[in-house]
Amino acid sequence: MGLLSNLFKKGEAPLFRFIDPILGAMRWSEDDGKWLGEYKHKTFGLAYEGKTTPASDLIAYAHDLLDDEGWQDATLAKAKEEAQKEYPETLVRS
């Protein structure tokens, strides 16, 4: 087989439902090509990497990221600030 056939080789079929002890239940979204879930009132998605379930290192990273409230607040504040600069006439400042 050539390089291109390996590059586009289909992986294992993802499980429709996956439950992580910390993140909880996730469902496979064929349209998005990832597992979708909700944790602490925030929706998240975990990428498909050719296996039936999300990769353990990706799950661990999601645990860390979704538990870090300071990172989320800082990231959202920065995005809001950038959007207000780019679209000042369409955003209401708070």
Image (cartoon, rainbow, N blue to C red):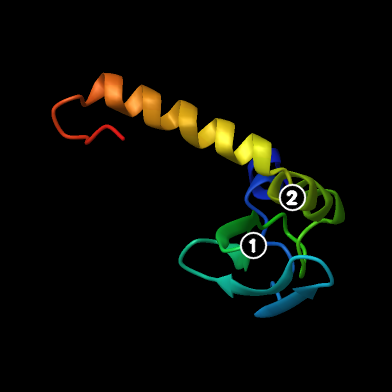
Q: Position of residue 55 (x, y in %)?
A: 81, 56
Toward the left, the furthest residue is: 89
**Res. 40 mark:** 1
In-image side of 14 versus 81 (left or right): right
Quadrant (top left/top right/bottom left/bottom right) for the C terminus: top left
Q: Position of residue 85 (x, y in %)?
A: 28, 19
76, above or below 13, in the image = above
Give the amino acid type for the residue marked by disc 1 in the picture.
Answer: Lys
**Numbered circles on residues, count:** 2
Q: Secondary structure at mark 2?
A: helix
Toward the bottom, the furthest residue is: 17
Give the amino acid type for the residue marked by disc 2 in the picture.
Answer: Asp
Q: Secondary structure at mark 1?
A: loop
Q: Position of residue 46 (x, y in %)?
A: 65, 56
53, above or below 90, in the image = below
Q: Residue at x 72, y 54 (%)?
A: 49
Q: Nearer the viewer, residue 28 or 43?
A: 43
Q: Residue at x 69, y 50 (%)?
A: 66
In-image side of 44 versus 9 (left or right): left
Q: Which tag, 1 or 2, sits closer to the chain's start?
A: 1
**Res. 94 mark:** none
Toward the front, the furthest residue is: 94
Q: Nearer the viewer, residue 45 or 63?
A: 63
Q: Nearer the viewer, residue 16 or 25?
A: 25
In-image side of 1 versus 46 (left or right): right
Q: Residue at x 79, y 55 (%)?
A: 59
Q: Quadrant of residue 38?
A: bottom right
Whole-Å distance between the Cαs marked 1 and 2? 8 Å
Q: Quadrant of residue 45?
A: bottom right
- List the residue tagged with mark 2: 67
